[in-house]
Amino acid sequence: MIRFVDVHKSFGENHVLRGLNLEINRGETLVIIGQSGSGKSVLLKHMIGLLQPDRGQIYIDGVNVTELREEKELYAVRRKFAMLFQGAALFDSMTVAQNVSFGLERYTTFPQEKIEKIVTECLDRVGLRNVEHLMPFELSGGMKKRVGLARAIAYNPEIILYDEPSTGIDQIRANAINDLINKLKEELNVTSVVITHDMDSTFKVADRIAMLYQGTIIECGTPEEIQQSKNRIVHQFIHGHAEGPLENW
Amino acid sequence: MTDPNRFSFLFRFLTKAGEAGALFNQTFKNIFTKSWEKKNFLQQLEEIGVKSLPIVTITAAFGGLVFGLQIYIAFTRYVGHGSEAYSGPIISLGLSKELIPVFVGLMLAGRVGSSMAAEIGTMKITEQIDALFSLGADPNRFLVVPRTLACIVILPMLTLYGDFIGILSGFFYNIVLMGVNRHVYITNTLTYFEMWDVVSGLIKAVFFGVIIAIVGCWQGLSTEAGAEGVGKATTRAAVISSVLILIFNFFLSEFLPGSFTG
Protein backbone atom coordinates (compact mmCIF):
# COMPACT_ATOMS: atom_id res chain seq x y z
CA MET A 1 0.00 0.00 0.00
CA ILE A 2 2.82 2.42 0.92
CA ARG A 3 6.30 1.78 -0.44
CA PHE A 4 9.48 3.80 0.04
CA VAL A 5 12.22 3.05 -2.49
CA ASP A 6 15.75 4.40 -1.88
CA VAL A 7 14.48 7.65 -0.34
CA HIS A 8 17.04 10.34 0.49
CA LYS A 9 16.40 13.61 2.29
CA SER A 10 18.83 16.23 3.55
CA PHE A 11 18.40 19.50 5.40
CA GLY A 12 21.54 21.48 4.64
CA GLU A 13 24.46 19.35 5.80
CA ASN A 14 22.20 17.00 7.74
CA HIS A 15 21.54 13.88 5.65
CA VAL A 16 18.44 12.56 7.48
CA LEU A 17 17.16 9.78 5.20
CA ARG A 18 19.88 7.79 3.43
CA GLY A 19 18.40 5.40 0.93
CA LEU A 20 15.43 4.32 3.02
CA ASN A 21 13.33 1.33 1.87
CA LEU A 22 10.09 0.38 3.60
CA GLU A 23 6.78 -1.32 2.80
CA ILE A 24 3.55 -0.86 4.73
CA ASN A 25 0.67 -3.26 4.07
CA ARG A 26 -3.03 -2.42 3.97
CA GLY A 27 -4.81 -2.75 7.31
CA GLU A 28 -1.71 -3.25 9.44
CA THR A 29 -0.31 -1.12 12.25
CA LEU A 30 3.35 -0.46 11.62
CA VAL A 31 5.31 1.20 14.41
CA ILE A 32 8.50 2.99 13.43
CA ILE A 33 10.91 3.29 16.35
CA GLY A 34 14.17 5.16 16.63
CA GLN A 35 16.08 7.68 18.67
CA SER A 36 14.96 11.29 18.93
CA GLY A 37 16.24 13.13 15.88
CA SER A 38 16.62 9.95 13.83
CA GLY A 39 14.20 11.22 11.17
CA LYS A 40 10.97 9.47 12.18
CA SER A 41 8.85 12.61 11.79
CA VAL A 42 10.61 13.41 8.51
CA LEU A 43 9.65 9.95 7.25
CA LEU A 44 6.03 10.46 8.29
CA LYS A 45 5.84 13.88 6.63
CA HIS A 46 7.02 12.36 3.35
CA MET A 47 4.01 10.02 3.37
CA ILE A 48 1.50 12.85 3.56
CA GLY A 49 3.37 15.08 1.11
CA LEU A 50 4.46 17.69 3.63
CA LEU A 51 8.04 16.97 2.52
CA GLN A 52 9.39 15.86 -0.84
CA PRO A 53 12.39 13.52 -1.07
CA ASP A 54 15.63 14.71 -2.67
CA ARG A 55 15.93 11.31 -4.36
CA GLY A 56 13.94 8.06 -4.49
CA GLN A 57 10.29 7.14 -4.95
CA ILE A 58 7.28 6.89 -2.67
CA TYR A 59 4.37 4.77 -3.90
CA ILE A 60 0.88 5.07 -2.43
CA ASP A 61 -1.44 2.36 -3.80
CA GLY A 62 0.94 1.90 -6.73
CA VAL A 63 1.11 5.62 -7.63
CA ASN A 64 4.52 7.28 -7.46
CA VAL A 65 3.55 10.42 -5.54
CA THR A 66 6.95 12.05 -6.04
CA GLU A 67 6.05 12.48 -9.71
CA LEU A 68 2.63 14.02 -9.12
CA ARG A 69 2.49 17.70 -10.01
CA GLU A 70 -1.23 18.28 -10.64
CA GLU A 71 -2.93 19.68 -7.57
CA LYS A 72 -5.98 17.45 -8.11
CA GLU A 73 -3.88 14.29 -8.07
CA LEU A 74 -1.96 15.38 -4.96
CA TYR A 75 -5.25 16.28 -3.29
CA ALA A 76 -6.67 12.81 -4.04
CA VAL A 77 -3.62 11.15 -2.47
CA ARG A 78 -3.67 13.46 0.56
CA ARG A 79 -7.38 12.65 1.05
CA LYS A 80 -6.42 9.05 1.92
CA PHE A 81 -4.34 10.20 4.90
CA ALA A 82 -5.01 11.68 8.28
CA MET A 83 -2.42 12.64 10.82
CA LEU A 84 -2.40 12.92 14.59
CA PHE A 85 0.31 15.46 15.35
CA GLN A 86 2.62 15.25 18.34
CA GLY A 87 1.08 18.25 20.10
CA ALA A 88 -2.34 17.57 18.47
CA ALA A 89 -1.93 20.80 16.40
CA LEU A 90 -5.52 21.90 17.05
CA PHE A 91 -6.37 25.26 15.52
CA ASP A 92 -6.23 27.71 18.44
CA SER A 93 -8.78 30.10 17.02
CA MET A 94 -11.46 27.43 16.46
CA THR A 95 -13.75 25.48 18.76
CA VAL A 96 -13.46 21.72 19.13
CA ALA A 97 -16.39 21.24 16.73
CA GLN A 98 -14.82 23.53 14.11
CA ASN A 99 -11.53 21.67 14.46
CA VAL A 100 -13.15 18.26 13.96
CA SER A 101 -15.26 19.42 11.02
CA PHE A 102 -12.36 21.18 9.28
CA GLY A 103 -11.27 18.27 7.06
CA LEU A 104 -14.87 17.18 6.48
CA GLU A 105 -15.78 20.59 5.09
CA ARG A 106 -12.88 20.48 2.64
CA TYR A 107 -12.84 16.83 1.63
CA THR A 108 -16.61 16.25 1.41
CA THR A 109 -19.73 18.04 0.22
CA PHE A 110 -21.90 16.93 3.15
CA PRO A 111 -24.65 19.29 4.36
CA GLN A 112 -24.09 21.08 7.66
CA GLU A 113 -26.47 18.82 9.66
CA LYS A 114 -24.61 15.71 8.55
CA ILE A 115 -21.25 17.30 9.38
CA GLU A 116 -22.50 18.16 12.88
CA LYS A 117 -23.71 14.58 13.34
CA ILE A 118 -20.35 13.14 12.24
CA VAL A 119 -18.50 15.54 14.58
CA THR A 120 -20.55 14.31 17.54
CA GLU A 121 -20.03 10.66 16.51
CA CYS A 122 -16.27 11.08 16.13
CA LEU A 123 -15.94 12.83 19.48
CA ASP A 124 -18.03 10.07 21.04
CA ARG A 125 -15.79 7.45 19.43
CA VAL A 126 -12.73 8.95 21.17
CA GLY A 127 -14.61 9.18 24.48
CA LEU A 128 -15.49 12.88 24.53
CA ARG A 129 -18.97 14.31 25.07
CA ASN A 130 -20.31 17.87 25.23
CA VAL A 131 -16.98 19.45 24.38
CA GLU A 132 -17.96 20.78 20.94
CA HIS A 133 -18.13 24.39 22.11
CA LEU A 134 -14.81 24.38 24.03
CA MET A 135 -11.68 26.10 22.75
CA PRO A 136 -8.39 24.14 22.59
CA PHE A 137 -6.85 26.10 25.49
CA GLU A 138 -9.63 24.77 27.74
CA LEU A 139 -8.61 21.14 27.11
CA SER A 140 -6.05 18.94 28.91
CA GLY A 141 -3.16 17.36 26.98
CA GLY A 142 -4.96 14.02 26.72
CA MET A 143 -8.21 15.65 25.59
CA LYS A 144 -6.34 17.59 22.90
CA LYS A 145 -4.91 14.33 21.55
CA ARG A 146 -8.39 12.82 21.51
CA VAL A 147 -9.82 15.80 19.65
CA GLY A 148 -6.88 15.57 17.24
CA LEU A 149 -7.75 11.93 16.70
CA ALA A 150 -11.45 12.74 16.20
CA ARG A 151 -10.42 15.34 13.61
CA ALA A 152 -8.22 12.75 11.91
CA ILE A 153 -10.91 10.07 11.60
CA ALA A 154 -13.78 12.42 10.73
CA TYR A 155 -13.46 12.15 6.94
CA ASN A 156 -12.86 8.39 6.87
CA PRO A 157 -9.20 8.27 5.89
CA GLU A 158 -7.64 5.00 4.74
CA ILE A 159 -4.35 5.62 6.54
CA ILE A 160 -3.80 7.29 9.90
CA LEU A 161 -0.34 8.57 10.79
CA TYR A 162 0.41 8.96 14.49
CA ASP A 163 3.35 11.19 15.44
CA GLU A 164 4.43 10.29 18.99
CA PRO A 165 0.87 9.66 20.23
CA SER A 166 1.90 8.99 23.84
CA THR A 167 4.40 11.83 24.24
CA GLY A 168 3.54 14.56 26.73
CA ILE A 169 0.70 12.73 28.48
CA ASP A 170 0.65 10.52 31.56
CA GLN A 171 0.73 6.72 31.40
CA ILE A 172 -3.02 6.28 31.95
CA ARG A 173 -3.89 8.66 29.11
CA ALA A 174 -1.15 7.13 26.95
CA ASN A 175 -2.77 3.71 27.46
CA ALA A 176 -6.15 5.15 26.59
CA ILE A 177 -4.67 6.47 23.33
CA ASN A 178 -3.11 3.05 22.64
CA ASP A 179 -6.51 1.41 23.15
CA LEU A 180 -8.05 3.96 20.79
CA ILE A 181 -5.47 3.20 18.09
CA ASN A 182 -6.35 -0.51 18.35
CA LYS A 183 -10.09 0.19 18.47
CA LEU A 184 -9.99 2.46 15.41
CA LYS A 185 -8.00 -0.12 13.50
CA GLU A 186 -10.62 -2.78 14.23
CA GLU A 187 -13.71 -0.63 13.74
CA LEU A 188 -12.59 1.43 10.74
CA ASN A 189 -10.14 -1.07 9.22
CA VAL A 190 -7.56 1.64 8.69
CA THR A 191 -3.85 1.27 8.05
CA SER A 192 -1.90 2.86 10.89
CA VAL A 193 1.66 4.14 10.95
CA VAL A 194 2.86 5.08 14.41
CA ILE A 195 6.19 6.69 15.21
CA THR A 196 7.32 6.59 18.78
CA HIS A 197 10.21 5.91 21.11
CA ASP A 198 7.82 4.64 23.79
CA MET A 199 8.37 0.86 23.82
CA ASP A 200 5.35 0.23 26.01
CA SER A 201 3.06 1.77 23.40
CA THR A 202 4.96 0.08 20.61
CA PHE A 203 4.27 -3.45 21.82
CA LYS A 204 0.63 -2.63 22.63
CA VAL A 205 -0.33 -1.47 19.16
CA ALA A 206 2.16 -2.92 16.65
CA ASP A 207 1.52 -5.62 14.06
CA ARG A 208 5.03 -4.95 12.79
CA ILE A 209 7.89 -2.81 14.05
CA ALA A 210 10.57 -1.07 11.98
CA MET A 211 13.67 0.49 13.50
CA LEU A 212 15.06 3.64 11.88
CA TYR A 213 18.74 4.25 12.46
CA GLN A 214 21.12 6.58 10.62
CA GLY A 215 18.61 7.26 7.86
CA THR A 216 17.70 3.67 6.98
CA ILE A 217 15.48 0.89 8.32
CA ILE A 218 17.90 -1.50 10.00
CA GLU A 219 15.33 -4.07 11.13
CA CYS A 220 11.66 -4.74 10.44
CA GLY A 221 9.48 -7.54 11.79
CA THR A 222 6.72 -8.64 14.14
CA PRO A 223 6.97 -7.61 17.81
CA GLU A 224 8.23 -11.14 18.65
CA GLU A 225 10.90 -10.97 15.95
CA ILE A 226 12.03 -7.53 17.12
CA GLN A 227 12.17 -8.69 20.73
CA GLN A 228 14.38 -11.58 19.72
CA SER A 229 16.52 -9.48 17.37
CA LYS A 230 20.24 -10.17 17.41
CA ASN A 231 20.95 -6.65 16.18
CA ARG A 232 22.76 -4.92 19.08
CA ILE A 233 21.34 -1.51 18.20
CA VAL A 234 17.75 -2.81 18.17
CA HIS A 235 18.37 -4.78 21.34
CA GLN A 236 19.78 -1.77 23.17
CA PHE A 237 16.97 0.50 21.99
CA ILE A 238 14.03 -1.73 22.88
CA HIS A 239 15.50 -2.53 26.30
CA GLY A 240 16.59 1.06 26.95
CA HIS A 241 20.14 0.22 28.02
CA ALA A 242 22.40 3.24 28.52
CA GLU A 243 25.49 1.27 27.42
CA GLY A 244 25.82 -0.03 23.88
CA PRO A 245 26.36 1.01 20.28
CA LEU A 246 23.78 3.83 20.62
CA GLU A 247 25.92 6.28 22.52
CA ASN A 248 25.61 9.52 20.63
CA TRP A 249 22.42 10.86 22.12
CA MET B 1 42.25 34.43 -1.80
CA THR B 2 38.52 35.22 -1.81
CA ASP B 3 36.91 34.77 1.58
CA PRO B 4 33.91 32.40 1.11
CA ASN B 5 32.02 34.27 3.86
CA ARG B 6 32.50 37.55 2.07
CA PHE B 7 29.34 37.12 0.03
CA SER B 8 27.34 35.22 2.64
CA PHE B 9 25.38 38.32 3.66
CA LEU B 10 24.50 39.02 0.04
CA PHE B 11 23.59 35.37 -0.50
CA ARG B 12 21.34 35.35 2.59
CA PHE B 13 19.72 38.60 1.53
CA LEU B 14 19.00 37.31 -1.96
CA THR B 15 17.65 34.01 -0.57
CA LYS B 16 15.28 35.84 1.78
CA ALA B 17 14.21 38.28 -0.91
CA GLY B 18 13.55 35.28 -3.15
CA GLU B 19 11.37 33.65 -0.45
CA ALA B 20 9.31 36.82 -0.04
CA GLY B 21 9.08 37.23 -3.81
CA ALA B 22 7.87 33.65 -4.24
CA LEU B 23 5.21 34.16 -1.55
CA PHE B 24 4.09 37.37 -3.26
CA ASN B 25 3.91 35.59 -6.61
CA GLN B 26 1.99 32.60 -5.24
CA THR B 27 -0.43 34.83 -3.32
CA PHE B 28 -1.34 36.96 -6.34
CA LYS B 29 -1.71 33.87 -8.50
CA ASN B 30 -4.14 32.47 -5.91
CA ILE B 31 -6.02 35.77 -5.66
CA PHE B 32 -6.72 35.84 -9.39
CA THR B 33 -6.99 32.16 -10.28
CA LYS B 34 -8.08 30.09 -7.29
CA SER B 35 -10.74 29.98 -4.65
CA TRP B 36 -9.79 31.29 -1.23
CA GLU B 37 -11.39 31.44 2.20
CA LYS B 38 -14.02 34.19 2.15
CA LYS B 39 -14.86 33.71 5.83
CA ASN B 40 -11.27 34.41 6.81
CA PHE B 41 -11.26 37.50 4.60
CA LEU B 42 -14.25 38.94 6.48
CA GLN B 43 -12.62 38.11 9.82
CA GLN B 44 -9.47 39.87 8.72
CA LEU B 45 -11.42 42.92 7.58
CA GLU B 46 -12.67 43.27 11.13
CA GLU B 47 -9.32 42.47 12.70
CA ILE B 48 -7.31 44.81 10.49
CA GLY B 49 -9.91 47.49 9.81
CA VAL B 50 -12.35 48.02 12.64
CA LYS B 51 -9.83 47.34 15.40
CA SER B 52 -7.31 49.77 13.87
CA LEU B 53 -9.74 52.69 13.94
CA PRO B 54 -8.72 54.05 17.37
CA ILE B 55 -5.00 54.07 16.61
CA VAL B 56 -5.56 55.63 13.17
CA THR B 57 -7.82 58.30 14.71
CA ILE B 58 -5.22 59.28 17.31
CA THR B 59 -2.32 59.19 14.84
CA ALA B 60 -4.14 61.20 12.18
CA ALA B 61 -5.50 63.74 14.69
CA PHE B 62 -2.15 64.51 16.28
CA GLY B 63 -0.36 64.25 12.92
CA GLY B 64 -2.79 66.86 11.54
CA LEU B 65 -2.41 69.10 14.58
CA VAL B 66 1.37 69.10 14.58
CA PHE B 67 1.59 69.56 10.80
CA GLY B 68 -0.89 72.42 11.03
CA LEU B 69 1.23 73.91 13.81
CA GLN B 70 4.52 73.71 11.87
CA ILE B 71 3.00 75.13 8.69
CA TYR B 72 1.49 77.95 10.73
CA ILE B 73 4.92 78.74 12.24
CA ALA B 74 6.60 78.52 8.82
CA PHE B 75 4.12 80.94 7.23
CA THR B 76 4.28 83.49 10.04
CA ARG B 77 8.09 83.30 10.18
CA TYR B 78 8.96 83.32 6.47
CA VAL B 79 6.01 84.97 4.74
CA GLY B 80 4.54 87.19 7.42
CA HIS B 81 1.48 87.53 9.63
CA GLY B 82 -1.78 86.99 7.84
CA SER B 83 -0.28 84.63 5.28
CA GLU B 84 -1.20 81.58 7.42
CA ALA B 85 -4.65 81.72 5.87
CA TYR B 86 -3.05 80.43 2.65
CA SER B 87 -1.66 77.30 4.37
CA GLY B 88 -4.86 75.26 3.95
CA PRO B 89 -3.99 73.50 0.66
CA ILE B 90 -0.40 72.83 1.82
CA ILE B 91 -1.60 71.17 5.01
CA SER B 92 -4.21 69.13 3.14
CA LEU B 93 -1.80 68.11 0.37
CA GLY B 94 1.04 67.22 2.75
CA LEU B 95 -1.25 65.16 4.92
CA SER B 96 -3.16 63.29 2.22
CA LYS B 97 -0.21 62.63 -0.12
CA GLU B 98 2.52 61.87 2.39
CA LEU B 99 1.94 61.94 6.11
CA ILE B 100 -1.32 60.08 6.56
CA PRO B 101 -0.54 57.16 4.18
CA VAL B 102 2.87 56.75 5.82
CA PHE B 103 1.54 57.14 9.37
CA VAL B 104 -1.26 54.63 8.73
CA GLY B 105 1.21 52.27 7.03
CA LEU B 106 3.68 52.43 9.90
CA MET B 107 0.99 52.05 12.56
CA LEU B 108 -0.48 49.01 10.82
CA ALA B 109 2.97 47.52 10.21
CA GLY B 110 3.39 47.61 13.99
CA ARG B 111 -0.11 46.52 14.92
CA VAL B 112 -1.17 44.20 12.11
CA GLY B 113 2.06 43.03 10.44
CA SER B 114 3.64 41.91 13.69
CA SER B 115 0.40 40.26 14.81
CA MET B 116 0.24 38.29 11.53
CA ALA B 117 3.84 37.14 12.01
CA ALA B 118 3.15 36.13 15.63
CA GLU B 119 -0.08 34.26 14.82
CA ILE B 120 1.22 32.42 11.77
CA GLY B 121 4.60 31.83 13.44
CA THR B 122 2.89 30.21 16.43
CA MET B 123 0.82 28.08 14.04
CA LYS B 124 4.04 27.05 12.29
CA ILE B 125 5.92 25.93 15.41
CA THR B 126 2.87 24.09 16.80
CA GLU B 127 2.42 22.24 13.48
CA GLN B 128 -0.94 23.89 12.76
CA ILE B 129 0.31 24.86 9.29
CA ASP B 130 1.12 21.18 8.62
CA ALA B 131 -2.31 20.27 9.99
CA LEU B 132 -3.98 22.70 7.57
CA PHE B 133 -2.16 21.05 4.69
CA SER B 134 -3.03 17.54 5.85
CA LEU B 135 -6.71 18.51 6.17
CA GLY B 136 -6.93 19.70 2.57
CA ALA B 137 -6.45 23.43 3.08
CA ASP B 138 -3.69 25.27 1.23
CA PRO B 139 -2.01 27.49 3.87
CA ASN B 140 -1.49 30.23 1.28
CA ARG B 141 -5.18 30.36 0.32
CA PHE B 142 -6.30 29.91 3.91
CA LEU B 143 -3.96 32.36 5.65
CA VAL B 144 -2.03 34.60 3.26
CA VAL B 145 -4.60 35.48 0.58
CA PRO B 146 -7.36 36.64 2.99
CA ARG B 147 -4.86 38.77 4.94
CA THR B 148 -3.36 40.30 1.80
CA LEU B 149 -6.76 41.09 0.30
CA ALA B 150 -8.00 42.54 3.58
CA CYS B 151 -4.92 44.80 3.78
CA ILE B 152 -5.39 45.89 0.14
CA VAL B 153 -9.01 46.85 0.89
CA ILE B 154 -8.54 48.28 4.37
CA LEU B 155 -5.37 50.36 4.09
CA PRO B 156 -6.87 52.84 1.55
CA MET B 157 -10.08 53.04 3.60
CA LEU B 158 -8.19 53.77 6.80
CA THR B 159 -6.02 56.27 4.91
CA LEU B 160 -9.10 58.06 3.57
CA TYR B 161 -10.53 58.17 7.09
CA GLY B 162 -7.13 59.39 8.38
CA ASP B 163 -7.07 62.11 5.69
CA PHE B 164 -10.42 63.37 6.90
CA ILE B 165 -9.35 63.41 10.56
CA GLY B 166 -5.92 64.90 9.77
CA ILE B 167 -7.23 67.71 7.55
CA LEU B 168 -9.92 68.47 10.12
CA SER B 169 -7.25 68.65 12.84
CA GLY B 170 -5.09 71.01 10.75
CA PHE B 171 -8.18 73.14 10.21
CA PHE B 172 -8.99 73.04 13.93
CA TYR B 173 -5.46 74.16 14.92
CA ASN B 174 -5.33 77.05 12.47
CA ILE B 175 -8.90 78.29 12.54
CA VAL B 176 -10.08 77.50 16.07
CA LEU B 177 -6.88 77.71 18.09
CA MET B 178 -4.85 80.30 16.16
CA GLY B 179 -7.71 82.39 14.78
CA VAL B 180 -6.64 82.24 11.11
CA ASN B 181 -9.08 83.72 8.57
CA ARG B 182 -11.56 80.93 8.01
CA HIS B 183 -12.94 82.15 4.69
CA VAL B 184 -9.51 82.53 3.01
CA TYR B 185 -8.31 79.21 4.47
CA ILE B 186 -11.30 77.23 3.17
CA THR B 187 -11.46 79.00 -0.20
CA ASN B 188 -7.78 78.37 -0.84
CA THR B 189 -8.06 74.76 0.21
CA LEU B 190 -11.01 74.16 -2.12
CA THR B 191 -9.24 75.97 -4.99
CA TYR B 192 -5.81 74.35 -4.85
CA PHE B 193 -6.33 71.00 -3.13
CA GLU B 194 -7.05 68.34 -5.81
CA MET B 195 -8.81 65.02 -5.76
CA TRP B 196 -5.60 63.51 -7.14
CA ASP B 197 -3.79 64.48 -3.91
CA VAL B 198 -6.14 62.13 -2.05
CA VAL B 199 -6.11 59.43 -4.75
CA SER B 200 -2.31 59.29 -4.96
CA GLY B 201 -2.21 58.76 -1.17
CA LEU B 202 -4.72 55.94 -1.52
CA ILE B 203 -2.62 54.31 -4.27
CA LYS B 204 0.34 54.40 -1.90
CA ALA B 205 -1.83 52.81 0.78
CA VAL B 206 -2.56 49.84 -1.52
CA PHE B 207 1.19 49.22 -1.92
CA PHE B 208 1.71 49.58 1.84
CA GLY B 209 -1.10 47.07 2.47
CA VAL B 210 0.58 44.51 0.24
CA ILE B 211 3.94 45.11 1.98
CA ILE B 212 2.44 44.69 5.47
CA ALA B 213 0.57 41.48 4.64
CA ILE B 214 3.28 39.78 2.59
CA VAL B 215 6.08 40.63 5.03
CA GLY B 216 3.97 39.63 8.07
CA CYS B 217 2.90 36.31 6.53
CA TRP B 218 6.37 35.57 5.12
CA GLN B 219 7.98 36.12 8.52
CA GLY B 220 5.32 33.97 10.17
CA LEU B 221 5.70 31.12 7.68
CA SER B 222 9.49 31.14 7.99
CA THR B 223 9.45 31.07 11.80
CA GLU B 224 11.74 28.53 13.39
CA ALA B 225 13.16 27.70 16.81
CA GLY B 226 10.19 27.97 19.17
CA ALA B 227 9.01 30.96 21.17
CA GLU B 228 12.26 32.85 20.57
CA GLY B 229 11.74 32.42 16.83
CA VAL B 230 8.21 33.83 17.08
CA GLY B 231 9.55 36.87 18.94
CA LYS B 232 12.20 37.47 16.31
CA ALA B 233 9.73 37.00 13.43
CA THR B 234 7.36 39.49 15.05
CA THR B 235 10.05 42.14 15.43
CA ARG B 236 11.42 41.51 11.94
CA ALA B 237 7.96 41.81 10.40
CA ALA B 238 7.42 45.26 11.96
CA VAL B 239 10.93 46.50 11.13
CA ILE B 240 11.14 45.18 7.56
CA SER B 241 7.68 46.38 6.58
CA SER B 242 8.26 49.83 8.16
CA VAL B 243 11.54 50.28 6.28
CA LEU B 244 9.97 49.08 3.02
CA ILE B 245 7.05 51.48 3.49
CA LEU B 246 9.43 54.44 3.84
CA ILE B 247 11.49 53.35 0.81
CA PHE B 248 8.43 52.68 -1.36
CA ASN B 249 6.90 55.98 -0.26
CA PHE B 250 9.81 57.92 -1.73
CA PHE B 251 9.73 56.07 -5.04
CA LEU B 252 5.96 56.28 -5.33
CA SER B 253 6.10 60.03 -4.62
CA GLU B 254 8.77 60.32 -7.29
CA PHE B 255 6.97 58.33 -9.95
CA LEU B 256 3.30 59.14 -9.33
CA PRO B 257 2.32 62.35 -11.14
CA GLY B 258 2.35 65.42 -8.87
CA SER B 259 -0.88 66.75 -10.26
CA PHE B 260 -3.49 65.98 -12.91
CA THR B 261 -4.36 69.58 -13.69
CA GLY B 262 -0.89 70.50 -15.00
Image (cartoon, rainbow, N blue to C red):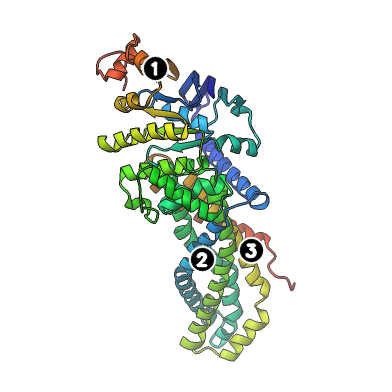
Estimate the x, y position of residue A35 in percent, counting from the top left. 35, 24
The mark found on residue B49 in the picture is: 2
The amino acid type, in three-letter code, at marker 3 is Ile
**Residue drawn 47% across and 75% down?**
B61
Work out whether residue B197 can be spotted. yes
**Residue drawn 63% across and 71% down?**
B198
Find the residue positioned furthest to the front.
A187
Q: Which residue is mark 3?
A: B203
Estimate the x, y position of residue A7 in percent, counting from the top left. 53, 21
Residue B159 sits in quarter: bottom right
Q: Are marks 2 and 1 on the same chain?
A: no
Estimate the x, y position of residue B234 in percent, counting from the top left. 43, 50
**Residue drawn 60% across and 43% down?**
B22
Q: Are marks 3 and 2 on the same chain?
A: yes
The chain letter for the residue carrying disc 2 is: B
| Vertical comparison of B98 with B121: above or below | below
| Vertical comparison of A157 with A193: above or below | below
The mark found on residue A160 in the picture is: none
The amino acid type, in three-letter code, at marker 1 is Thr
Front: mark 2 or 1: 1
Q: Which residue is mark 1?
A: A222
What kind of element bears circle 3? helix
What kind of element bears circle 2? helix
Q: How many marks?
A: 3
N-terminal of the pair, mark 3 or mark 2, is 2
Alpha carbon distance from label 1 to label 3: 66 Å
